[in-house]
């Protein structure tokens, strides 16, 4: 009898172990299997949160098949105590194992809100953007200019610990404009009193953190420009129209200010290369403007004839060759164009009314292009004058 009882007991234990093993295997399979999400979602983990709260958030979003298995999996892999605060993108179909890794891995937030401070030639703009997890694209939530009242949404996200911040510097902005804009932000730490040399700051997008000193941010821009210049100078053409990295920045800055059309940069560069080779003056308006403003703001009007004739170190209607310094901070593409211009016979160009330029090899051809541009200007002026009457 006892043998029978013992035999049945062993059988029951075996069955129980088998069932337990099956449950464990099922749980492991569920933990690593594809999740129920049809579309990606953004999960925000508040500072001081715990795995129980995060589990409830995920369950509410329909991201996990079993809250119990999710928490057991996090506990079993010793990750429950590694939870990180932030906003995290949970992809469609993410397994519970993958989600645990996402919220415990650390690093920068991968979802949520970012603030971009755009430093342009004519204005400084703050833009609040929020990631749409379904499309993985940022959607503009608010924007305002530096001299306007901050948008309400901006003030809200400034209070959120996981908001990310970037400074985006446009090509052709001067060093003074960059420093002046950064000093004016309500996010940065200590101001920078001394303006870096013109042309030495790379137009690009830079991640920043609240409290970063302006000098720290500017140093990164300076380092980036050094890297770009060193790389492109090493790859320069033998017949490049410049003789040093310093001259490269000067010519690139003029190219940058003369055209906003990417496809034209090397053509514009060819005009200046041909003029330098022939001993002609560059005669470019942006250098005259820089001689007036010294890069501190925008002139905001047309040039006067007296200003075109006035002697300044930057007035290329008066001086021979290149001016002594860059007139703005050129981007990578303009630096590359200065070191490798198109092979053309162009020595003139003028606006063509489309945003680009009409190029010419002879003065007669150039004069015809100028006459067409004058007609376009006159027509636009007449249309503007007539507009209020309509």
Image (cartoon, helix red, strand yellow):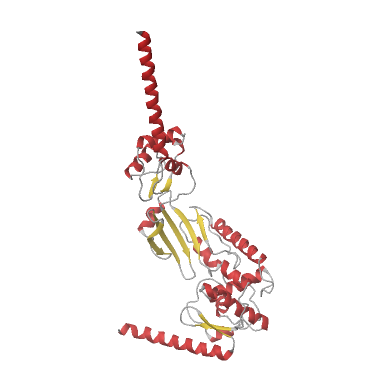
Q: Quadrant of residue 5?
A: top left
Q: Is residue 131 left or right of residue 340?
A: left
Asked if residue 283 shows in the view, the reply is yes
Rendered residue at 38%/87% (across/down): 382
Q: Quadrant of residue 276?
A: bottom right
Asked if residue 330 shows in the view, the reply is no
Q: Position of residue 252 (x, y in %)?
A: 60, 72
Instruction: Name the residue furthest left.
Output: 390
Tally the marks: 0
Q: Quadrant of residue 54?
A: top left
Q: Position of residue 204 (x, y in %)?
A: 53, 62
Foreground residue among 87 and 299? 87
Instruction: Name the residue furthest bottom.
Output: 364
Q: Position of residue 338 (x, y in %)?
A: 61, 72
Q: Name the image quarter holding the N terminus.
A: top left
Q: Name the image quarter holding the C terminus.
A: bottom left
Rendered residue at 54%/86% (across/down): 305
Q: Position of residue 213 (x, y in %)?
A: 53, 55
Vertical side of 353 occupied by 179: above or below = above
Foreground residue among 156 and 306? 156
Foreground residue among 338 and 319? 338
């Amino acid at each position: 009898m006892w043998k029978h009882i013992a035999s049945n007991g062993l059988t029951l234990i075996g069955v129980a172990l088998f069932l337990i093993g099956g449950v464990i295997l099922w749980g492991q399979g569920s933990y690593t299997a594809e999740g129920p999400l049809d579309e990606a979602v953004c999960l925000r983990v508040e500072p001081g949160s715990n795995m129980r709260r995060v589990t409830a958030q995920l369950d509410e979003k329909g991201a996990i098949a079993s809250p119990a298995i999710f928490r057991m999996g996090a506990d079993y892999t010793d990750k429950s105590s590694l939870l990180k605060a932030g906003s995290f993108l949970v992809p469609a179909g993410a397994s519970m194992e993958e989600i645990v890794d996402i919220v415990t891995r650390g690093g920068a937030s991968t979802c949520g809100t970012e603030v971009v401070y755009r430093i342009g030639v004519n204005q400084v703009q703050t833009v609040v953007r929020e990631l749409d997890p379904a499309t993985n694209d940022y959607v503009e939530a608010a924007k305002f200019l530096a001299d306007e009242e901050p948008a309400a949404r901006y003030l809200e996200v400034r209070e959120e610990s996981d908001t990310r911040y970037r400074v985006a510097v446009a090509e052709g902005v001067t060093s003074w404009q960059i420093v002046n804009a950064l000093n004016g932000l309500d996010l940065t730490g200590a101001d920078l009193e001394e303006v870096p040399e013109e042309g030495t700051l790379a137009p690009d997008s830079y991640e920043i953190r609240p409290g970063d000193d302006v000098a720290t941010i500017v140093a990164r821009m300076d380092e980036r420009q050094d890297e770009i210049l060193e790389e492109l100078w090493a790859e320069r053409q033998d017949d490049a129209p410049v003789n040093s990295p310093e001259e490269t920045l000067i010519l690139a800055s003029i190219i940058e200010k003369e055209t906003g059309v990417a496809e034209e940069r090397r053509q514009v560069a060819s005009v200046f290369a041909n003029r330098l080779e022939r001993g002609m003056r560059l005669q470019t308006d942006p250098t005259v403007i820089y001689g007036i403003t010294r890069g501190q703001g925008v002139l905001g009007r047309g040039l006067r004839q007296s200003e075109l004739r006035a002697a300044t170190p930057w007035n290329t209607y008066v001086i021979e060759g290149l001016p002594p310094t860059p007139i703005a901070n050129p981007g990578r593409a303009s630096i590359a164009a200065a070191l490798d211009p198109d092979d053309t016979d162009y020595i003139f160009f003028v606006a063509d009314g489309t945003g680009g330029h009409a190029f010419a090899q002879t003065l007669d051809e150039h004069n015809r292009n100028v006459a067409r541009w004058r007609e376009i200007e006159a027509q636009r002026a007449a249309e503007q004058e007539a507009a209020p009457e309509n």
